Amino acid sequence: MVEVRGKLSFPSSSWVVAAAVYFFLVPHLRADPSSLAPENTSAALARSLAAEEQRLGPANPNLLRILAPLAQLRFEDADIAGATALRRRALKIAIAAYGNSSVPAAEAMAALGRLYIDLRRYLDAEPLAIAADDVLSSKLGAEGAAKAAVLADRARIALARGELSHAQKWAAAAVAADAKIGKAPHGDRLRVLGAAFAAQGRFADSERLLRQALAVDRPAGDRLATARDLAQLAKAYIRQKRFSEALPLIEEATLIDQQRLGATHPLIAEDFHDIGLIYLADNRAANAARAFRNAIRVLNRGAGRGMPTLAYVELDLARAEHALGHEDKAQSLFSDARRILNIAQDEERERQRQV
């Protein structure tokens, strides 16, 4: 999480005011009724899956073509348990049908690992990304879209661990892998390379790449990718203390996410967290606390309960409560966050011991 300090002023445009009302008063709603379309698609895919299971059997590899898009829709609808179960099932089917050193198995490993990355479960994601990378390297060499996607995943994991040189290396290799097959840079690859540059303090390079990613994803109509580009660019601006420029970006990302994702999706909580950090930097502790509480509400209602992400938001809410003079609330939040992080640290040690 990025710590922010300093005084700033924000534009008072009607768009910002309207967005603020929407964010803080109606955080639980999807704004656009047309966003129900993906749910209808999800139901149709679920029916198709059931029909194909009946016709082919539950372990037939032809089910993979349905499991993958259905898992993605479940993830977008904040059915994290359902999405995870489908990804794991796809991996099991791919290994049984093609072997654990096959390209389909590697693609299924990568897809499950990518889900874990999106949930910030990097310990779960890393062995899957490494295994997928090894298989794809042996089968496809250094080229191919699947290889590029896995390299970008490894870059994200390295970035989360603070291994900035590795993150840059793998992200740059992902962009190069796209170029080798004659494709324009994928927004996803540009985004992680831009994030790596921002973490290194190479802000001009970071902004150039993140705006390039936005120029790829927005015209393509990929709204969720556009939201991630906006959020990442906002984070880069926060690092530079360019808070007034970061705010409208993260507000737009939040609006997209609330329209396209399920109400308890952890990415929405991340958006609220970033908004709170910006308000906290402006010494607007009450607004910051409201944003942090919205983030906590989303996490507690969904898959974020008890996760380290929740602890980080609680720590920032404790800072806001302290600024408001609510010392008892601040201490309670700090204690709960410490409890969650201690549990997570113990779990990480146990996994390392088992490995």
Image: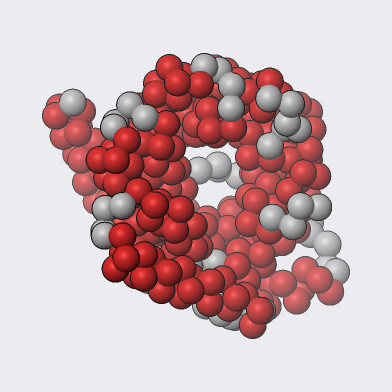
Considering depth in this image, is 351 or 276 the residue closer to the camera? 351
Q: Is residue 291 left or right of residue 304?
A: right
Percent across and percent down for residue 45 are: 46, 68
Residue 346 in view here: yes
Front position in the image: 340 or 92:
92
At horizontal 77% and vertical 68% (from top left) the residue drawn is 16
Image quarter hosting the C terminus: top left
Q: Is residue 99 left or right of residue 48?
A: left
The residue that appears at 58% across and 27% down in the rendered structure is: 144
Q: Does residue 309 appear in the picture of this structure? A: no
Which residue occupies 41% across, 74% down? 47
Q: Quadrant of residue 37?
A: bottom right
Q: Position of residue 58 (x, y in %)?
A: 26, 59
Residue 351, image x, y percentages: 19, 33
Q: Residue at (58%, 78%) from the top-left corner?
A: 36
For residue 34, which quarter of the picture?
Answer: bottom right
Q: Toward the viewer: 149 or 136? A: 136
Q: Is residue 318 above or below residue 6?
A: below
Q: Is residue 201 above or below residue 110?
A: above
Q: Is residue 339 above or below residue 145?
A: below
In the picture, measured across the screen, residue 79 lies left or right of residue 155, that is left
Q: Position of residue 128 (x, y in %)?
A: 35, 33
Instruction: Name the quadrant containing residue 175.
Output: top right
Front residue of this view, candidates 38 and 234: 38
> In this figure, what is the number of numbered marks?
0
Scheme of image coloration: secondary structure
